[in-house]
Image: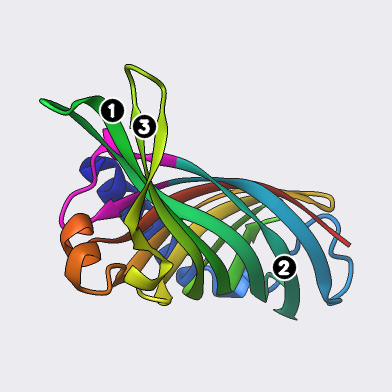
């Protein structure tokens, strides 16, 4: 996963550089449905492939979560827009164990309300790159233990929302494909804030930060 994450960052950096070098061209381009510089509003939904990281992120710890929300797109010039979003985003990770206690996994479930603010560059009539910061508020958190042998699921009662930091922030970068009013996209969310609020949560998460690939589909009006 470390290599995949590094490759994604390099791809995004290259795309961002390309966008800067082709700014003049981008100003003359727009998606097939953008006949004028009118604001657009829409909804989108998809999935997070999330994880917690310190220096490395391992594939086997990846957790699937929901990502749904609304967005607004405000064209500045043809080919360049500012796009704020508001989304419910489920993040976290899963950690497997196989020891004297048995065979199972711990699932860290961290649910946020996120506010990304993205700069969107159209590099063609149906293709864009987007990047920007995000801020997030933790709405709920729990850690569950799943026993693979019995199928039982238990809550770890010593760790809940109060043990994690309420605010998170980071960077977002990705690509999108626009087909009329529909959009398909993929992006990477890179957290910059440690999620554990010290104590047991800090020890349990090893002072990790959020990390997530998001794949989504949306429709604008």
Q: Residue 97 magenta-drawn?
A: no
Q: What segment is highlighted magenta in the picture?
A: 50-63
Q: Position of residue 3 (x, y in %)?
A: 22, 42
Horizontal arrangement in the rendering, residue 60 relative to residue 69 (left or right)? left
- Please tell me whether residue 62 is drawn above or below residue 43 in the rendered image: above
Q: Position of residue 84 (x, y in %)?
A: 65, 75
* Snapshot quadrant of residue 211: bottom left
- Mark 3–mark 1 distance (CA, rounded to whole Å): 5 Å
Q: Are discs 2 and 1 less than 8 Å apart at CB?
A: no
Crowding at label 2, few (<14), some or many (≥20) Cα neighbours within 10 Å?
many
From the viewer's side, name the closer residue of 51 and 118.
51
- Please tell me whether residue 203 is drawn above or below residue 23 in the rendered image: above
Q: Position of residue 42 (x, y in %)?
A: 80, 62
Q: Position of residue 32 (x, y in %)?
A: 82, 55
Q: Secondary structure at mark 2?
A: strand
Q: Secondary structure at mark 1?
A: strand
What is the number of the mark on residue 71? 2
Q: Residue reaching furthest bottom? A: 76
Q: Residue reaching furthest left? A: 100
* Snapshot quadrant of residue 95: top left
Crowding at label 3, few (<14), some or many (≥20) Cα neighbours within 10 Å?
some
* Residue drawn at (41%, 22%) of the image: 151
- Mark 2–mark 1 distance (CA, rounded to whole Å): 39 Å
Horizontal arrangement in the rendering, residue 185 relative to residue 200 (left or right)? right
């Amino acid at each position: 996963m470390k290599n995949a994450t590094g490759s994604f960052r390099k791809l995004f950096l290259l795309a961002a550089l390309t966008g800067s070098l082709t700014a003049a061209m981008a100003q003359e381009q727009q998606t097939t449905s953008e006949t004028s510089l009118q604001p657009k509003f829409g909804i989108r939904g998809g999935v997070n492939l999330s994880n917690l990281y310190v220096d490395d992120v391992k594939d086997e710890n990846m957790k699937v979560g929901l990502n749904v929300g609304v967005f607004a797109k405000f064209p500045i010039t043809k080919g360049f827009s500012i796009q704020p979003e508001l989304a419910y985003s489920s993040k976290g990770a899963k950690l497997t164990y196989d020891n004297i206690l048995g065979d199972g996994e711990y699932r860290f479930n961290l649910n946020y309300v996120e506010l990304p603010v993205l700069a969107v560059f159209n590099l063609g009539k149906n293709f864009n790159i987007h990047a920007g910061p995000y801020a997030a508020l933790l709405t709920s958190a729990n850690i569950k233990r799943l026993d693979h042998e019995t199928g039982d699921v238990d809550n770890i009662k010593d760790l809940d929302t109060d043990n994690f930091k309420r605010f998170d922030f980071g960077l977002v970068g990705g690509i999108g494909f626009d087909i009329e009013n529909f959009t398909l996209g993929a992006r990477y969310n890179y957290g910059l804030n440690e999620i554990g609020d010290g104590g047991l949560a800090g020890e349990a998460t090893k002072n990790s930060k959020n990390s997530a690939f998001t794949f989504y589909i949306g429709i604008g009006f």
